[in-house]
Amino acid sequence: MLKPKIGICTAILEGFNLDEDDSFAYQADLIEASKKLGFEVVAATSLIASLQQARQAARLFNDRDVDAFVLLFGTFTDDKKVMPLLQDIDKPLIMWATDYNAYNVSITGSQNVIPVAYELGLDYHYIYGRFDDRTALEDYRRFVRACAVKNRLKQSNIGYVGGHPSIMTSLGIDQLAVKQTFDVNLIDFGNEHIVLAREKIAPDRAKREWNTFKQLAAKVETSEQNGLEAAATHLCILDMVKKHGLHAVSINCFPHFKGKVCLSIAKLNHMGIPAACEGDLNATIMMYILHLLSGRAVSNGDQMKVLKLDTPQNSLMFSHCGAGAFSLAKDQKEVTIHDDYETGKGAAVFFPQRIPGQVTVTNLMGTSYGYKMFMARGKALDSDLMDHYQGNPINIAFPFNIRELLARVAQGGFGHHWNIGYGDHMQELIHLCNLNGIDYTTMDAVEWRPR
């Protein structure tokens, strides 16, 4: 589960009858509020009233690798005295002003520093409010979580196996652009790494692993040979993950690995290691982001199918071949392992995703000018409309007309792979896009009235 690490310091101006001693209590209250939000707190040991104290706080926050830091304005503030906090820390800055005491002139103090942060081109976020203000705290929580995701990406290794399918040009990537935007470490492999490593997996080890797969399903309708090959494939990919410390994996299955890596991708996602098929590295990164935000497995789908149109609960079905995380099944009784339905070879996992709840639906695309993200909020339904649909279908109702969604997807040039995470993570994603220079499109501005 994502546990953001936040630095906290408080700036004051001494000697001007601003009741600066109040700031000791202000910082203590903000620390307590941050802990209640689930943050790990790194607090400056003294109030910031001098360059030396600002430098000490900057060193502390850098040494502890905070995800972001708060500059709380206890009083009006000398902008030059806090300059090390602005210039020496390469992490997002939160400037927080309050109105506890009119003599503090906290808001005015923040406005003395804001123009400096702006002209320096800093990633900063402004919050006004008391430490029991729900609106301020929710704004704080979401921004800090986005900062934590940004920092986790920087620390992450992502496996890129086999490139992308030749028939899907839009899935091609510029590795330098990926590095520049997300700062992840890409580790390249060819599909031959899997083929060669699979041959070295001991038969008894593959047998034990195949038994663990069978325990996750209610029905197994594939051959023992297919199952053992899928288990050996998973073990060599898992060995790759452990050896290289991978946090997520992209695997190109098309065309020769179709049905050969489905069970492994399903198991990796079930284990908390986001994995995408068809060589979609962008989907892998998006799944990893949603996994960090939700703490749950993420659905990777395409095959949009209109189930209900122009109704108060119009919906789309998303599905993919059969590589959904086992934990996305509402009931193990609905999980079946059988031959890949597209090729008739290999083995895949099939079940309808019926776990109801709010979801965030996303699409991440690389372009010639950078990255862009589409996001929308919907509600996953416990639906029986997908009973006989192969793959891992999920039915999502949207609070707007899906004609508008499809039109906006087309107008924005978005692709066919969709990642769906449980929970409302829209604001965190917007913050992350702003922090990482990603263009984004949302459906929030769309109001729909049934015709």
Image (tube, rainbow, N blue to C red):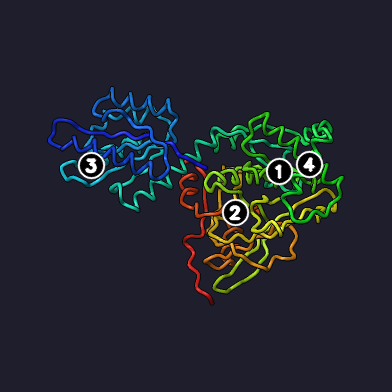
Q: CA distance from mark 2 to mark 4?
A: 27 Å
The disc at residue 106 is 3
Q: Earlier in the sequence, mark 1 or mark 3?
A: 3
Q: Amino acid at mark 4?
A: Ala
Which residue is tagged 2?
A: 420
Residue at left offset 61%, top offset 71%: 309
What type is the residue that disc 3 sits on? Ser
Find the distance from the CA under tag 1 to the CA under tag 3.
Answer: 51 Å
For this view, does 201 lie left or right of residue 397?
Answer: right
Specify the quadrant of the image occupied by residue 36: top left
Name the secondary structure under disc 3. Answer: helix
Element carrying mark 2? strand
Which sits earlier in the primary sequence, circle 4 or circle 3?
A: 3
Which one is earlier in the sequence, the residue at label 1 or at label 4? 4
Could you tell me which quadrant the C terminus lies in?
bottom right
Relative image position of residue 350 (x, y in whole percent): 74, 56
Distance in Å between CA atoms under marks 2 and 1: 18 Å
Task: Give the left or right position of residue 219, taking residue 38 as reference.
Answer: right
Q: Which residue is mark 1?
A: 279
